[in-house]
């Protein structure tokens, strides 16, 4: 699903710029509806995976379309987008907090099919609000036809991107046991071909020239990839350690994840308020510092005998980066390129986030393997904490350097 979403996000961003963000948002919901209604009736695991791919493609349209809509409406009303972006970030954090617990209740009461049925009222609610409150897309006289647009979505670029990502992930996942060196060769060759293709393509899948032309956009995508890698390492890794390393049950393990996302909601609200006085760099510095401290505590403080209150404290610290880094990156993304590229850049940024999510699966696999030996449950958390804290440290250094350069360039820095 994440690989499909990583592919679908830039495509959706491109479609937003061509056909209009509101229209693409509703198309995405329609695809999600098809996948939702078909999912419970899939006859085998293979078909269910195919349905999840369709679900990933449909859901990938929402973020770039929403970002394009926010920027368009903000520009029309001559308003700052920070508050709207803050609301979206709060909704994302709230969903992350409620999703695992709600999913567990739904599966317990309705079976695995319930995770599809629960989408139906959410979809209807989304369609009603978008249809009734979002202004129609502005008319365009230069809009190409559907057939021409499909040809211009760069299918060769998509195939090269998928080949690069899949071969790299399989190589990394298999690396602890065996090194599949031919896959590494495939990854390097596919990546080189992908960059060359996107550089010279008239309508590239990922606009490499845009990334080169706007260095701030490239840095924002790299930060987004790094922060989402750390986020999903926590999201996937901590519940596993709570049960395997700390010996807690599923219910308590799930409840211990609430501080991470609950504080993330509060942190996003605080970051939204502070964004009126602080630049995005300061928000990112606060978030990356909290990530560094929380990762250090995971690596050096927590063990199989840690009391519950200490686990809650670390969860609180892990929640702070979610709000500040998320909003800081979104504001940086808004400032990095012109509004005319809003859909495309949001799609590229979303792809960077999903690539980070895929990397986290590899990292969690490594850390769980590291903790599989006798008495090594602490080692697995140590490795995971080092990754999270190391990511926070690298982000801190980058933000401090960027703030210093900003002060040198501006006589009146914020």
Image (cartoon, rainbow, N blue to C red):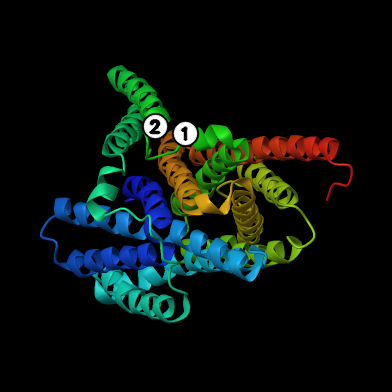
Give percent across and percent down for residue 224: 55, 45
**Residue at label 1?**
208
Q: Residues within 10 Å of mark 2 (few under 14, many from 20)?
A: many
Q: Which mark is residue 105?
A: none
Q: Residues within 10 Å of mark 1 (few under 14, many from 20)?
A: many
In the displayed structure, 133 sits above or below 350; it is below
Asked whether the residues under the numbered discs 1 and 2 touch, taking CB atoms below 8 Å apart as contact, a structural biologist would say yes
Q: Of all residues shown, which one is farthest toward the right? A: 411
Give percent across and percent down for residue 190: 33, 25
Q: Secondary structure beneath disc 1?
A: helix
Residue 301, visible in the rendered structure? no
Q: Residue at x 35, y 56 (%)?
A: 143
**Residue at label 2?**
198
Answer with left or right where residue 225 lies relative to residue 139: right
Residue 354, visible in the rendered structure? yes
Give percent across and percent down for residue 186: 30, 22
In the rendered image, which quarter is residue 269 located in?
Answer: bottom right
111 or 96, which is in the foreground? 96
Give percent across and percent down for residue 331: 64, 54
In 3D space, how far apart are the residues under numbered discs 1 and 2 (Cα atoms)? 6 Å
Q: Secondary structure beneath disc 2?
A: helix
Answer with left or right where residue 118 lies relative to residue 272: left
């Amino acid at each position: 699903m994440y690989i499909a979403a990583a592919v679908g996000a830039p495509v959706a961003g491109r479609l937003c710029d061509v056909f209009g963000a509101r229209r693409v948002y509703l198309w995405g919901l329609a695809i999600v509806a098809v996948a939702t209604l078909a999912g419970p009736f899939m006859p085998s695991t293979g078909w269910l995976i195919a349905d999840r791919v369709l679900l990933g493609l449909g859901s990938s349209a929402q973020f770039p379309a929403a970002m394009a809509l926010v920027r368009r409406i903000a520009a029309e009303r001559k308003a700052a987008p920070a508050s709207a972006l803050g609301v979206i970030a709060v909704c994302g954090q709230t969903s992350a907090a409620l999703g695992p617990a709600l999913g567990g209740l739904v599966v317990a009461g309705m079976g695995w099919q319930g995770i599809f049925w629960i989408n139906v009222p959410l979809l209807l609610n989304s369609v009603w609000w978008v249809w009734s409150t979002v202004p129609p897309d502005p008319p365009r006289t230069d809009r190409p036809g559907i057939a021409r647009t499909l040809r211009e979505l760069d299918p060769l670029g998509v195939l090269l991107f998928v080949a690069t990502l899949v071969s790299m992930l399989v190589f990394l996942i298999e690396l602890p046991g065996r090194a599949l060196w031919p896959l590494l060769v495939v990854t390097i060759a596919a990546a080189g071909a992908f960059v060359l293709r996107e550089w010279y393509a008239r309508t590239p899948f990922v606009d490499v020239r845009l990334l080169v032309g706007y260095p701030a956009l490239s840095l924002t995508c790299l930060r987004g990839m790094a922060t989402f890698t750390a986020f999903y390492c926590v999201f996937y890794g901590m519940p596993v350690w709570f049960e395997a390393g700390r010996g807690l049950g599923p219910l308590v393990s799930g409840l211990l994840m609430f501080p991470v996302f609950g504080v993330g909601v509060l942190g996003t609200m605080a970051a939204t308020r502070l964004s009126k006085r602080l630049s995005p760099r300061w928000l990112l510095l606060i978030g990356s510092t909290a990530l560094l401290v929380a990762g250090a505590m995971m690596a050096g403080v927590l063990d199989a005998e840690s009391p519950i209150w200490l686990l809650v404290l670390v969860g609180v610290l892990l929640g702070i980066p979610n709000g500040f880094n998320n909003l800081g990156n979104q504001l940086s993304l808004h400032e990095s390129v012109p509004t005319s590229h809003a859909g495309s850049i949001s799609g590229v940024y979303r792809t960077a986030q999903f690539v980070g999510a895929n990397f986290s699966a590899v990292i969690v696999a490594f850390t769980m393997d590291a903790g599989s030996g006798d008495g090594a449950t602490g080692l697995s958390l140590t490795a995971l904490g080092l990754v999270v804290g190391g990511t926070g440290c690298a982000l801190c250094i980058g933000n401090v350097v960027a703030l210093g350069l900003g002060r040198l360039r501006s006589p009146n820095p914020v």
